[in-house]
Amino acid sequence: MFYQLVSPYIERSSEQNFKRNQIIYHEGDKPKSLYFINSGLVGLFHISAEGKETFLRVFGKEDIFGHRSYLAEEPYHASSVALTPVTLTVISSEECNRICHSNPELLMSITSMVARDLGDAELRLAGLLDKTAHRRISESLVYLKLKHPDYTWTRKEIGEYSGSTPETVTRVMRILERKNIIKKHGRDFEILNNDKLLSLKEEDLY
Amino acid sequence: MFYQLVSPYIERSSEQNFKRNQIIYHEGDKPKSLYFINSGLVGLFHISAEGKETFLRVFGKEDIFGHRSYLAEEPYHASSVALTPVTLTVISSEECNRICHSNPELLMSITSMVARDLGDAELRLAGLLDKTAHRRISESLVYLKLKHPDYTWTRKEIGEYSGSTPETVTRVMRILERKNIIKKHGRDFEILNNDKLLSLKEEDLY
DNA sequence: CGTTAGTTTGAGGCAGATCAACTTTGGTGG
DNA sequence: CCACCAAAGTTGATCTGCCTCAAACTAACG
């Protein structure tokens, strides 16, 4: 959703392609570029020392990513991975500096986005402590599927996004299907009753 | 750490005082002001529907707070509470708009801080999933105590910061004291061995 | 000192992770 | 177009870290 705002000001950029599962940048690397998605889906993942993955953010068409580390002037705190074949427009940090300097209102809207993401992250953090895995999974199904209806999310991805496991995702989805709240199509699924998915009572979970 | 940067530009501001446990603003309120701490300690808490509290951020002398919602143009996603008696300098959003407009480099440094906070929040989120409560509590002891050595953190606060409970905090602290890693002084505690606290092996936890 | 908020300790329970075996899906190439 | 197979999903059994609850204890402050 940002590319349209920025693109008029870009003087130099390059295009890059990635295949599914290719890593675009690694946690710990120093940021040298900013990325815009022309097509495809990108996931931001943190991987712990013991190998446990957490799915932090999804980026889709016209989204920007890599900006957090650039703005914070820190190494990447997580790795970005192509979830589908991806085409990116890449611009250098220098180019971005130039653009931001000459367009304060653009910087302001990026700031605003980062501030919203911070709120989202903190609410998710709180949700891990005060919501059941069932509820988090239900909410993740809505979030992921509404945001990217055409992508077939794996149980592993849903698990890592919701702070759970593929097995628990399967179990919750089976219950939801039995209640006619979702419907499976092979590995994919469809949401039949959005509202019910977001307002589950305890008794709906069995 | 921000007040010094901003203060030369402030034309209108007011001072406000709060007692311990007073709420400065409520989750859901519309932000109308920005706050700078002259003295005292402020905590940002999220409270779930069922009453579970999560301790999101701490603010101390010369810190700014309330800026996230202002920048995101959203209602507050959490409540701020005075942890000690607090004196604040309060400026209106309009005043802040004026200052940010005429000082792009100031806006840039606030953006940078929010971007760092987003990284921190996401790493904490990942930590809830891949670290044991023991390790999170140990890390929280270091973070909270080093940041504000003179404040006596309650077990409840440490629990809510680390994503745990007062009981578990007590149990972990007892083990750490037995290992001469911390030392209790009444309800307060002192860190004797910082490095050991951050590099605990599994066998150190019993 | 008396009171209250905060802390400690123990016992018990459970949500959800883990492990393992089996089934299904959907892409691939013969 | 079908047969194959690796990857993904399902299912059941088991296990456990930490929460919850409850009761006794103690620090700190007026």
Image (cartoon, coloured by chain):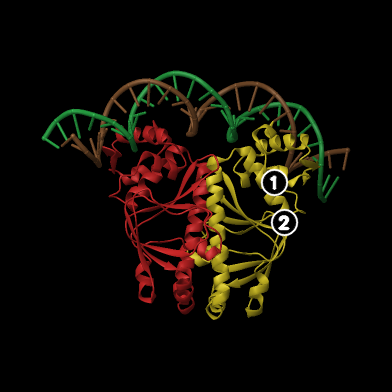
Chain colours: A red, B yellow, C brown, D green
Using the image, tell me which numbered label, if any, was put on residue A196: none
Give coordinates of residue A169: x percent, y percent. Answer: 39, 36
Name the residue beneath numbered marker 2: B84
Of pointers 2 and 1, the one earlier in the residue sequence? 2
Give coordinates of residue D13: x percent, y percent. Answer: 44, 18
- For the question of whether residue B48 can be seen, the reply is no
Kind of element beneath mark 1: helix
How many numbered circles does the render carry?
2
- Left or right: residue D2 versus residue A100 is left
Give coordinates of residue B156: x percent, y percent. Answer: 67, 43
Using the image, tell me which numbered label, if any, was put on residue B141: 1
- Type of amino acid at the residue the image marks with label 2: Thr
- Left or right: residue B124 versus residue B166 is left
The structure residue drawn at horizontal position 45% and vertical position 77%, both measured from the top left corner, is: A103
**Quarter of the image that includes the N terminus of chain B:** bottom right
The structure residue drawn at horizontal position 48% and vertical position 64%, both measured from the top left corner, is: A32
Pointer 2 local density, CA inside 10 Å: few below 14, some 14–19, many at least 20: some
Disc 2 is attached to a residue of which chain? B
- Type of amino acid at the residue the image marks with label 1: Leu
Give coordinates of residue B75: x percent, y percent. Answer: 49, 61
Kind of element beneath mark 2: loop
Disc 1 is attached to a residue of which chain? B
